[in-house]
Image (spheres, rainbow, N blue to C red):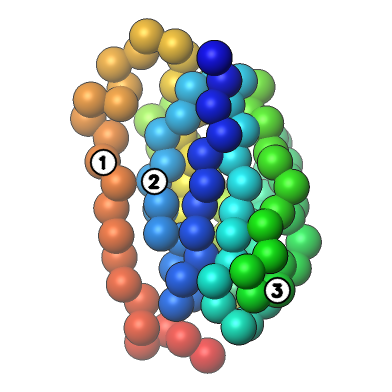
Amino acid sequence: MPKTHVVEIIGYEYQQSNLVIEVGDKVKWINRDPTPHTATRSQAPTFDTGLLSKDQVSGEVEFTEASDANGFEYLCTPHQFMTAKVIVTLPGSNLKAYVHDRHHPTPDKRR
Ligand SMILES: [Cu+2]
């Protein structure tokens, strides 16, 4: 069964910065900051949540193709130092075993 995953944006960071999903899964973003943020990818597969205001939930983005281990990177349009990736695996792949969710605080980069 395809799943829907949620990425929260808190303190100018995507909390699930290396999100591992399976082909066919969907992702949506929730902004918890008072500052508007987006989740935007301009290369294929493209997606763009548009500006999300505080506590706004984006539409769901469905991922229909697998990525490599580097995943599909995206950023926040107004704050391009904010980046994260979605790693899309084929069902049954063992990629999940060695991809970890990393958390990199970036307080110095806040503007
Ligand atoms: Cu932002």
Query: As shown in the figure, which amino acid type bears the numbered disc 2?
Result: Asn
Give the residue displayed 69% in from the left and 39% down from the top: 61
- For residue 82, say whether it is visible: no
Instruction: Give the number of the mark in front: 3 or 2.
Output: 3
Check contact, mark 1 vs mark 2: CB within 8 A. Answer: yes
Residue 60, x across and y down, in percent: 70, 41
Q: Residues within 10 Å of mark 2 (few under 14, many from 20)?
A: many
Residue 68 visible to an observer of this rendering: yes
Q: CA distance from mark 3 to mark 1?
A: 29 Å
- Name the residue that disc number 3 marks: 53
- The residue sitting at 67% across, 31% down in the picture is 62
Q: Is residue 42 left or right of residue 30?
A: right
Q: Disc 2 designates what residue? A: 18
Instruction: Quadrant for the N terminus, please.
Output: top right
Marks 3 and 2 sit apart, C-alpha to C-alpha, by: 23 Å
Q: Residue furthest right?
A: 50
Q: Residue at x 62, y 82 (%)?
A: 35
Q: Quadrant of ligand 1?
A: bottom right
Front-most of residues 1 and 74: 1
Q: Percent x, y for residue 26? A: 61, 33
**Residue 107: x %, y % from top left:** 36, 83
Dot 3 alpha-carbon crowd within 10 angstroms: few under 14, some 14 to 19, many 20 or more: some
Name which residue type carries label 3: Ser
Whichever of labels 1 and 2 marks the residue nearer the N terminus, that label is 2
Q: Earlier in the sequence, mark 3 or mark 1?
A: 3
Q: Secondary structure at mark 2?
A: strand
Where in the figure is residue 64, as x and y percent of width and height? 65, 22
Residue 17 position (above or below residue 72) = below
Local SS, label 3: loop
- Identify the mark nearer the N-term, 3 or 2: 2
* Res 100 label: 1
